[in-house]
Image: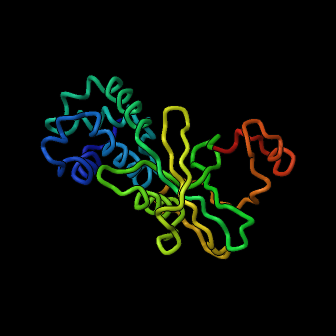
Amino acid sequence: MSVPQEILDDLGSRFLIHLPPEEKKDPTRLCFQVELAYWFYLDYYAGEGSLLPSLSMSQFTFELFSHIPGMAKFAKRTDEIIATWKQFKFAVPTFGCIMIDDAYEKVLLVQGYWSKSTWGFPKGKINEGEEPHHCAMREVQEETGFDCSHLLKKNVYLDRRVGDHDQRLYIVPGVSRETIFLPRTKKEIRSIRWFNVCDLPAFKKDPTPAERLGMNSNHFS
């Protein structure tokens, strides 16, 4: 079962048609927009109770490329393009926040929507031309619904390297535990929860979370 033409028209006009001509020539860069279209499709068209197909990113990209004039030439190379995009995407730095309660006892973690997703700090990829601290604030607001701009100090952060991937986390203290958190995007964040700092793993294979939370250290990223 394929995606109806009118839906592909809508997604194309929302995310791809308006792009400058030079961006439309680079299928790897296009995949960032295709990803946004893919999440929109899953959120608003193929949600619970829908009869529309729940496609993989590769299947969705093939359908969207095939449908849009000027991009159909990329369709037969979808798997190759997606593989190149994933390598490129992994190399893009990630920025987020370590949100700490006003008693300095707990930190806020989010869990990805899909099964077996780990718990981690709200974070995400930086957009082209975006300031790092703006990226961190945007990702926190998208994933938790919380505007941390009044608490974040752009010179207070931790940098770390995960494999070949650079990550920066801004320290954001003073977040009230009474705050109501609500993700702004669907099917990205499953759960949001405060954790006691002393219950979290301090190193790989740390037994502490298993003893105190009933979770292995690999449940956290």
Q: Residue at x 58, y 48 (%)?
A: 112
Seen in the picture, residue 165 relative to 74 is either above or below; the reply is below
Quadrant where the N terminus is found in the figure: top left
Q: Is residue 48 visible?
A: no
Quadrant where the C terminus is found in the figure: top right
Q: What colour scheme has been applied to the protein in the rendered image?
A: rainbow
State the residue in front, 10 or 136. Answer: 136
Q: How many marks?
A: 0
Q: Residue at x 40, y 61 (%)?
A: 134
Q: Residue at x 21, y 52 (%)?
A: 13
Residue lying furthest front: 155
Residue lying furthest right: 211
Seen in the picture, residue 216 relative to 193 is either above or below; the reply is above
State the residue in front, 48 or 79. Answer: 79
Instruction: State the image coordinates of residue 218 (x, y, percent, origin top left).
Output: 70, 38
State the residue in front, 191 or 56. Answer: 191
Seen in the picture, residue 48 relative to 115 is either above or below; the reply is below
Hey, which quadrant is residue 219 in on the image? top right
Hey, which quadrant is residue 103 in on the image? bottom right
Instruction: State the image coordinates of residue 106 (x, y, percent, origin top left).
Output: 72, 63
State the residue in front, 166 or 41. Answer: 166
Residue 111 lies left or right of residue 50; in this view the side is right
Q: Residue at x 36, y 48 (%)?
A: 36
Q: Is residue 98 visible?
A: yes
Instruction: State the image coordinates of residue 33 (x, y, percent, origin top left).
Output: 30, 46
Instruction: State the image coordinates of residue 27 (x, y, percent, origin top left).
Output: 25, 34
Residue 158 lies left or right of residue 93; in this view the side is right
